[in-house]
Image: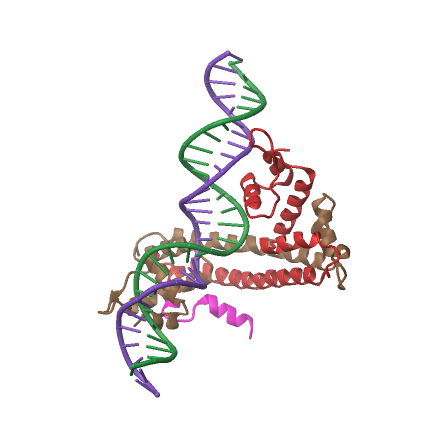
Chain colours: A brown, B red, C green, D purple
Amino acid sequence: MRIGELAKATGVDVETIRYYEKTGLLDAPARRGNGYRVYARAHLERLSFIRHCRALDLPLADVRRLLCLVGLPRTCCAEIDQLIDVQLARVRARLLSMRALERQLVALRGQCQAPRTASRCGILHELVAAAQGEACVCHRAACEEQP
Amino acid sequence: MRIGELAKATGVDVETIRYYEKTGLLDAPARRGNGYRVYARAHLERLSFIRHCRALDLPLADVRRLLCLVGLPRTCCAEIDQLIDVQLARVRARLLSMRALERQLVALRGQCQAPRTASRCGILHELVAAAQGEACVCHRAACEEQP
DNA sequence: CTTGACCCCGTAGCCGCTCCAGGGATTCTA
DNA sequence: TAGAATCCCTGGAGCGGCTACGGGGTCAAG
C-alpha cells in the first residue's frame, strides 16, 4: 500500500508518517521503481499502535520505548506500568490546572457583561489591577474556593 | 532596576524577559554604560500584566493585542470579551479531552496490576490489540460512559 | 495531451520558551 | 588585592510534534 492509503487507513497524516520514518519511529518501507514507498501490514499495525499511544497523549519517546518493549517479551513490565502511571499523573496535573484556569476565566469574564469602551472594560481593569499588585477576581475566586 | 531584579520581582525568568523584548512584547529599556538593561516601574507593571495573562494561558498574540488595547481606551471592548470567551472555550475543550484521557488511562492501567513479563503485560496487550483493530478498554470505557 | 491527484525531497516555520558558548562587569570573601 | 562567585551581554541552536512550502516527478482518466 502507498503512503496515502496508509494515511487513510490509520488516520495519520502523510507528512506525519514521513516524519515518523525520519525520526526512526516507523521503519523505512520498501520502494517501488518510481521511488514511492510501499507499506506492508506490519507497518499498518505499528502505525496504528503509535496512533493509539498518541491518542493517550504519550510522548513519542515513550511510544518509542513501548515499541522497543514489544520486541523484548521477556522484560519485566514494571517499566510499562510506570510509564502509564507517569502519564496518568501528568494528565491529572493538567486536569487540575485546567479546572483552576476555567474558574479564573469565568470569574474574569463576569467582570464585563455589556460592551463598553476599553477604558471601562471590567476585564481589562482587572488585568491591569492585577499587574499593579492588587488582588484580582481570578485569584480571589481561587482562594475562596479553598477556605 | 536590573534584569535580574525585575525577574525576581515578577517571577519571570531572565531569558524570558529578553525573549519578550526581542519579540516586541516588552519595550527595550534604557542601558547603563556597561550595556546592562535598566528597567523602570512601567516595565515592571507591563511585565506583570503579561505574566498574569500568561497565567491564564492566553497566547502571546492575545497578550500583545490586550496590551495594545490598554493604550486605546476608546475602543469598544467587545474584542476583549471575545478574546476571553475564546480562551474559555479552549480551556473547556481541553478539560473535556483531559477527562476522557484520564478515564482511558485508568482503564488501561487496570489491565496490569502486578509486574510480569512484557509479553504478559495487560497494558501492552491492550495497546497491541488496539493496533490490530480490536476494541480496547480505553475506547470501550469511553463508549460505555455515554450510552 | 492536459488535468488533477498522487508522490518525492529538503527545508523552514510554529509556540514559548530554554539553554548554550563565549565573552565582560561587578561584588563578595580571604 | 587577588580570586571566586555572581551577575550581565550577544547570537544562535534546540525542544516536541508536527505542518507547510517550494519545486519537482509519476500516473491514470477523460
Looking at the image, is A80 positioned above or below residue C7?
Answer: above
Using the image, determine if residue D11 lies above or below residue A54. Answer: above
Quarter of the rendering containing residue B8 = top right
Query: Of residues A26 and A90, which is closer to you in this image?
Result: A26
Image quarter (top left, top right, bottom left or bottom right) of the C terminus of chain B? bottom right
Q: Where B48 falls versus B113 (above or below)?
A: above
Count of numbered marks: 0
User: Which residue does the image show at 75% across and 63% down from the upper left?
Assistant: A115
Q: Is residue A24 visible?
A: no
Q: Percent position (x, y) of residue A119?
A: 76, 55
Residue at image coords 41%, 60%:
B123
| Of residues D1 and A102, the one drawn nearer to the viewer in this rendering | D1
* Secondary structure that dominates the magenta span: helix
Q: Quadrant of the N terminus of chain B?
A: top right
Task: Locate residue B120 relative to residue D11 in the image: left or right.
Answer: left
- Residue drawn at (33%, 55%), measured in percent from left and top? A68
Question: A92 or B6, which is in the foreground?
Answer: B6
Q: Which residue occupies the extreme left position in the image?
A: A33
Is A54 displayed left or right of B147 in the figure? left
Which quadrant of the figure has residue B30? top right
Q: Which of B143/B23 is in front?
A: B23
Which percent across, then down, holds residue A95?
57, 56
**Residue B141 falls left or right of residue C1:** right
In the rendered structure, does residue B47 fall within the stretch colored magenta? no
> Where residue B140 sits in the image (x, y, percent)?
48, 70
| B130 inside magenta stretch | yes
- Residue D8 x, y percent position in the rendering: 55, 33
Q: Is residue B52 visible?
A: yes
Q: Which residues are magenta?
A: B128-147
